[in-house]
Image (cartoon, rainbow, N blue to C red):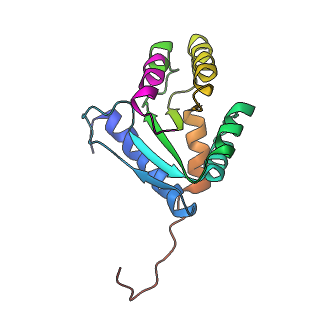
Amino acid sequence: MSSNKGKIGEMQTGKLLFDIAIKEESFDVKRPTLTNESDMGADFEINSTAQELQRVFQTAHVELTDDDKMILTSSKGNVNSRMDVKTTQNKIGKDTVDKFATDVHKHPNTTVHILTGGKALTAPAQRELNKYKKVFTQENKVLVYISNEGISQLKSEYEAVIPELDKGEND
């Protein structure tokens, strides 16, 4: 097994995202870079409907603001998202949130920006995220944080949903 903690965390998250994609009709996932390549804060790119994202966020116990909901529901067609995975059992600090928010402008065609990992955000990190959420709402961007507990909730809901394919079909 790999000893690279970051790689393991990303791959486990990728497995979960692909499980979600199997269950959610329009949910699709892309991993734009290899491990240890510069990714500009996008470990995964997600394309989905706003409704699918809202179901995922609800399952992960993410509370969307009224502005977040308005941005999602006003989106025409599918929504582009990026996910930045942090592999830690500790709380995520302000520096990580600052870096995450700085990367928003590197993805101008992305509406939803998702930071995952950690037990929670530290109090200064939560204040910083709240500040950034207000700023980026003006640009029709949604910023959300999903803790390790939220990821566990998603795993409970979505893992092991792989349907058996019809035998004899060749695609």
Magenta stretch mostly in which secondary structure? helix
Q: On the rendered image, what quadrant is the C terminus found in?
A: bottom left
- Tell me the magenta residue range: 98-110
Q: Quadrant of the N terminus?
A: top left
**133 or 165, which is in the foreground?**
133
Front residue of 23/107: it is 107
View extreme (bottom): residue? 168
Identify the residue at image location x=57%, y=43%.
Answer: 152
Q: Residue at x 61, y 15 (%)?
A: 131
Q: Residue 13 falls in which quadrant of the image?
A: top left
Q: Residue at x 43, y 45 (%)?
A: 45
Image point 32% across, 34% down: which residue?
39
Residue 97 higher or lower than 16, as above or below: above
Residue 76 visible in image: yes
- In the displayed image of the protein, which residue is found farthest to the top? 124
State whether residue 65 appears in this view: no
Residue 37's image quarter? Answer: top left
Give residue 99's quadrant in the image. top left
Residue 158 in the image, given as x and y percentages of width and height: 57, 56
Residue farthest right in this picture = 66
Q: Does the magenta stretch include residue 41?
A: no
